[in-house]
Image (spheres, coloured by chain):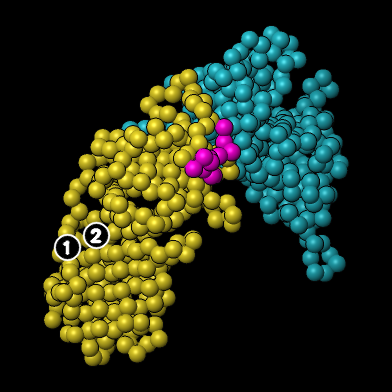
Amino acid sequence: MTVEEDENGSCDTPGAILQNIRPTRRSTTFATMPLSTQSQADDEQYVLVASLDNARNLSNILKAITFKDHAIFTATPNGLKVTVEDSKCLQANAFIQAEIFQEYTIKEDLVGFQINLTVLLDCLNIFGGSTVPGVSTALRMCYRGYGYPLTLFLEEAGVVTVCKINTQEPEEPIDFEFCSNNVTNKVILQSESLKEAFSELDMTSEVLQITMSPSQPYFRLSTFGSSGNAHYDYSKDSDMMELFRCTKTQTNRYKMSLLKPSTKALALSCKVSVRTDSRGFLSLQYLVRNDDGQICFVEYYCCPDEEVD
Amino acid sequence: MKFRGKIVDVACLNHFSRVITTISKLTKMCVLRLTPDNLFFVLSEKVANGGVSMWCELSQANFFDEYQMEGVSPEDNEICLEVTPENLSRALKTVQSAKSVKVKLTKKHCPCLTIAAELPTLSSISRVVTHDVPVDVIPRRLWHEFIEPSVPDFDVSIYLPPLKTMKNVVDRMKNLSNFLVIEANLNGEMNLKIETDLVSVTTHFKDLGNPPWGDDSSQDGGPSQGRDPDSMAEARVDIRRLQQFLMGQQVNPSKAMCNIVHQRILHLILLHEDVSLQYFIPAVA
């Protein structure tokens, strides 16, 4: 193998300094190619290639939805969507737009696969996931298509790691049929205000009750635990309340065990929108800024546990 | 049998403690050999240890200000004790701020290594703290089990990558697999590989350099003679053993290297001017 120049006549960074890694005599199922010195011919075989100078821009947002082992990856020309579901009642999605990636090439309208998310995160953090400033892990993610593993090339400080993670047939993500026309109540809050409440949530309560109303108490989170009931009220006039659009008083309960994982997404976010529709379905949308200040979204959909009028 | 030593330098005390802490992470129990010039911490290869063995050598003069010992007999001027390094480590941790620390072989209700330290207090009177760490005396007839291991007839010898990087990678790989393959060649290249049903991960290190063993006559003129520099020697080992060894970066070695006997043994060496640590991990199928 030799180092090939791309069509611009220059070698990509960050791997340009690396010499080619010679395949070992015992290399079996995978080639050991450094990050950016793959020739264009090699790229032909992939239906999806996505690169990041900083792998944390992917791994951090994935942490916000890692409450189950398996995730469905759906890639379109717009970007990457990663979906995790729990017992058909909860769905979490992380969106990483194509613009976030330094390189994003997709050869089909839709590329989908299922993968073990915990394994993927261990691979993305193979160099320890340190937060030393100026040191980051570069990532090149490649997928050849149905039946092939997801290949990751990761590089930090001149050391290259190649991971091949097996993929499975993707399940169809649930369509919660949550549409804006049906939204009865919506608030947008600065995440800061909710973080404290969520970190203190009484876990002995089986449900988290959310009350939204055009009148008092406006927006209330309630728990019913073994040591008593707790209420967190957010007034529509609060500094933290960026948008308040409630048309009708609604109280809904959601299983605490389903919503608790959303705390991770909340911790990463700067703003969160809380919406309920006429059926009592809950949509939480989080605005997350990555290391480079770019915006990504995470959303959680949850079915109500029971209707309380 | 007599032994008494005194450490007065705080840096020496610190370093000594760190060495013992590193050893405590490698093994629950080991043998401490005391000779006029050195201290050796030895773990001999036994099925019960999973086949690993360890040899750690400290030159007494680099740690102790005073050091007196009288062995079992004038011909066998040595003391051999079985110790639990964790107990020693804990005792030493409590006396890090001491003006001086004495280590003595004593007999309380059983043989002990007694650590006595003078700790500074706000008043002019010092506080004396004593720890009695129980030990077992190893009889002379068993001493042959605790001799320095010879360097194996290795296929490849190579310097290790920065231990912190290696440890980070091995820590993550441990989440994915119980076993790891370490392979290296005489071109300064080393790969760490794991492969399971779910995933395969390979980390490539380059330009590591190979130590010059060429003048060692026991190697038949040196292992590099006639060996294809690209050819990899490998050993498949239990990841936890490698992980335990990598915690030894605490010792801050000036040199770290390993020797691989293809599919047999991984021999890891940490060198420092005051202390050397060798760890042998057998390869598994």
Q: Which mark is residue A91?
A: 2
Q: Is residue B114 above or below residue A236?
A: above
Q: Is residue B146 left or right of residue B243?
A: right
CA gap, disc 2 and disc 1:
9 Å
Kind of residue indicated by mark 2: Gln
Say if mark 2 contacts mark 1, CB within 8 Å.
yes
Side of A214 relative to A238 (left or right): left
Circles 2 and 1 on the same subunit: yes
Q: Colour of chain A?
A: yellow
Q: Residue at x 25, y 37 (%)?
A: A146
- Percent coordinates x, y for residue B147 in the rendering: 69, 21
> Which image quadrant for residue B6?
top right
Where residue B224 appears, as percent x and y from the top left, is: 66, 15
Q: Nearer the viewer, mark 2 or mark 1?
A: 1
Q: Which residue is mark 1?
A: A176
Q: Is residue B255 magenta?
A: no
Residue A9 in magenta? yes
Circle 1 packing at 10 Å, graded few (<14), some (14-19), many (20+), is some
Using the image as rendered, state which of residue A64 and residue B145 is in the foreground.
A64
Q: Is residue B141 above or below residue A19?
A: above
Residue at image coords 69%, 42%: B252
Which residue is located at x 29 percent, y 43 percent?
A107
State whether the magenta stretch is mostly helix, strand or loop. Answer: loop
Q: Which SS class for mark 1?
A: loop
Instruction: Give the chain letter at badge 1.
Output: A
Chain that appears cyan:
B
Magenta region, residue range: A8-19
Q: How many marks?
A: 2
Q: Of label 2 and label 1, which has the lower sequence position?
A: 2
Name, please, the residue furthest toward the front: A8
- The chain containing the residue under callout 2 comes to A
Label 1 amino acid? Phe
